[in-house]
Amino acid sequence: MNVHRKPRSSTRPFTQRAVRIGLLAAGVAGVATAVPAQAATAAPHAAVASDHVFTHADRAHHTQAEDSFTVRQFGTVNAAAVRNQANAVSAGCSADDACRSVALSFQIVTIAGEHTHLNAVNLSDAANKKCTGCQTLAGAYQFVVSTPSPFTLDDTARRQLADIHRRLDELTRSSLPAADLKSQVDGLAAEVTGVLHDAAAHAPKGGAQPEVTLHRQLDGWPGH
């Protein structure tokens, strides 16, 4: 089997550390949420979440494109294990009959608690299997919001995230070349980071400063 894979890149390494983590308590229109509102005041517990997008394009299905945009709200936790993954495969197409496979996953994780043990894993992989001239892109973006105390996204932040989700859907369905798509998806990720930074800045004050961490893995064919 002839499989070509691009080396992975990341703006921040995967982390496993003890941190103070905060809560974005409100849901986002058009965005999946993991936990009911009462979780914000529940007793500390352990939390686990996994989001995975997979696409496979071939001669029978030339274009396969999918994205997800989830908000995982866990309330106060002692420990959390969160995983975000995107995989895209193009197989068996030719240069004059090329395939297109796009898998994009945005995961926003919010957790509250003192000295929470966090294991955050973020992975992506794009593979061309005997697929000349194919467009293949896999992008995994994981946002972790850390604040000393729980807080709630206001209506403005929810509308902003919903709009970013809508534009991510449009990009995923577009016919942009993989290199251009990478740049524009990175732009949307920067917007999410900005929205979360603004929201965290209005969180109740505490001993630690609010922090928003982005884990990024983006692979694509053709690429630079």
Image (tube, grey):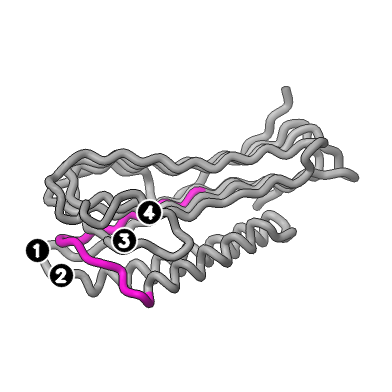
Mark 2 or mark 3, which is nearer to you? Answer: 2
Residue 146 is situated, as x and y percent measured from the top left of the image, at 24, 58
**Of pointers 2 and 3, the one earlier in the residue sequence:** 2
Name the residue carrying label 4: 33
Q: Is residue 11 visible?
A: no
Label 1 residue SS: loop
Are the residues tagged 3 and 1 within 8 Å (C-beta)?
no
Mark 4 or mark 3, which is nearer to you? Answer: 4
The quarter in which the N terminus is drawn is top right
- Cα separation, mark 1 vs mark 4, equals 28 Å
Magenta residues, start to end: 140-156
- Cα separation, mark 2 vs mark 1, equals 10 Å
Q: Is residue 202 above or below residue 33?
A: below
List the single residue furthest toward the bottom. 156
**Of pointers 4 and 2, the one earlier in the residue sequence:** 4
- Cα separation, mark 4 vs mark 3, equals 18 Å
Nearest to the observer: residue 79 or residue 187: 79
- Dot 2 crowding, Cα within 10 Å, few <14, some 14–19, many 20+: some
- Dot 1 crowding, Cα within 10 Å, few <14, some 14–19, many 20+: few
Give the amino acid type for the residue marked by disc 1 in the picture.
Gly
**Of pointers 1 and 4, the one earlier in the residue sequence:** 4
Mark 1 or mark 4, which is nearer to you? Answer: 4
Q: Which mark is residue 207?
A: 1
List the single residue furthest toward the top. 1
- Dot 3 crowding, Cα within 10 Å, few <14, some 14–19, many 20+: some
Mark 2 or mark 1, which is nearer to you? Answer: 2
Give the amino acid type for the residue marked by disc 3 in the picture.
Val
- Dot 4 crowding, Cα within 10 Å, few <14, some 14–19, many 20+: many
List the single residue furthest toward the right. 96
Q: Is residue 180 visible?
A: yes
Q: Residue at x 58, y 66 (%)?
A: 167
